[in-house]
Image (cartoon, grey):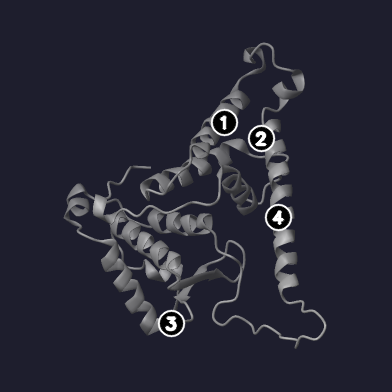
Amino acid sequence: MATLSIPEEHKLLLEVFEGPLDLLLYLIKKNEVDIYNIPISTIADQYMEYLDLMRMLDLNIAGEFLVMAATLMLIKSRMLLPPDQRPEGVEEAEEEDPRWELVRQLIEYRKFKEAASFLQDREMLQENVFAQGFTDVEAAAEPGLHIEEVGIFDLISALNSAMKRLPTESLATIFATTLSVSDKIESIMTMLRDKKQLSFSALFEGMATRQEIVCSFLALLELIRLKQLRVAQDQQFGDISVALAEQ
C-alpha cells in the first residue's frame, strides 16, 4: 500500500490496547479458518495490510507487531521451501509444519482471553448482588445502540474497505487537499445531530481522497475516545453503526 503523508497537525496518537496475537485471532475468526490449519500466506498478507493502515494512521504500534510481522514472513517463506532445501538441525515434526509454534501461542493466548472475559462477566454479575437487608435494584437497559463490542480492528477493517473503494488519485488532487481533524470532528457531529445514527460507510460517502478518509477516521476515533460517539455492530463483522452517545 502506498504511504500517505499526513501533516503533523493532522496526526492523532492513540493507544492500541490489542496486540499482534489479538489481530491474528481476529483475522482467523473473520476468515473462518481452522486455527490448527492457518492459511499462512493469506493471513500474513492481511496482517501486513492492517499493519500498513495502522502505520498510516500513526497509531502507537508496539514493537511486538513488527516482531510478529517478521515471524509470519519467516513461516511463509519456510512453507514455500521445497523439501530438499529445509534448514539443517530442525526436527521433522517442525519441518512438516512451521506454523505449530504460532498455533500453540494463539491457543494459549485465546485460553487466557476467554478466562479473563469469564472473570470480568462474573465481576459484573457480582456488582448486582446485594446483601440481605438492601433494596433490590435492577439496572435498566442501557439506551441507544445495544450490540456487539466494536474493537480497533473492526474499525480498521471498515476503514480498509472504504479506502479500497476510492479511485486512483493524482498527485495534484492529493496536494490540493487541505483538511484538519478538527474540521472533520465538527462535520461528523453535525451529520449525527441531523441523522441521529449512521452506518460507518455512510460517514465516508462522497469522499474522493485518501487524506479526507484518514482525517475523518481519526476524527471518529477521537470522538469515540472522548465518549461523544458510540459505535456498535448488530452482528460480529457486520456493518458498524455510529450514533451520538447518550448524555
Kindly identify which residue carries mark 2.
102
Q: How many marks?
A: 4
Query: Which secondary structure, mark 3?
Result: loop
Q: Are the residues at dot 1 and dot 2 in contact (C-beta closer than 8 Å)? A: yes
Question: Residue 71 got which mark?
Answer: 1
Residue 135, image x, y percentages: 75, 88
Judging from the image, what secondary structure is the residue with disc 4 in? helix
Residue 169 coordinates in the image, percent (x, y)? 26, 51
Mark with earlier residue (1, 2): 1
Say what amino acid the circle numbered 4 marks.
Ala
Gap in angstroms between the C-alphas marked 3 and 1: 44 Å
Q: Amino acid at mark 1?
A: Thr
Look at the image and tell me in which quarter the N terminus lies. Answer: top left
Give how far across and how far down residue 207 sits, in percent.
Answer: 31, 64
The kind of residue on which mark 2 rests is Leu
Badge 3, how many Cα within 10 Å: few under 14, some, many 20+? few
Contact, mark 4 vs mark 1 (Cβ under 8 Å): no
Kindly indicate whether the residue at mark 2 contacts the one at mark 4 (C-beta within 8 angstroms).
no
Q: Residue at x 64, y 15 (%)?
A: 86
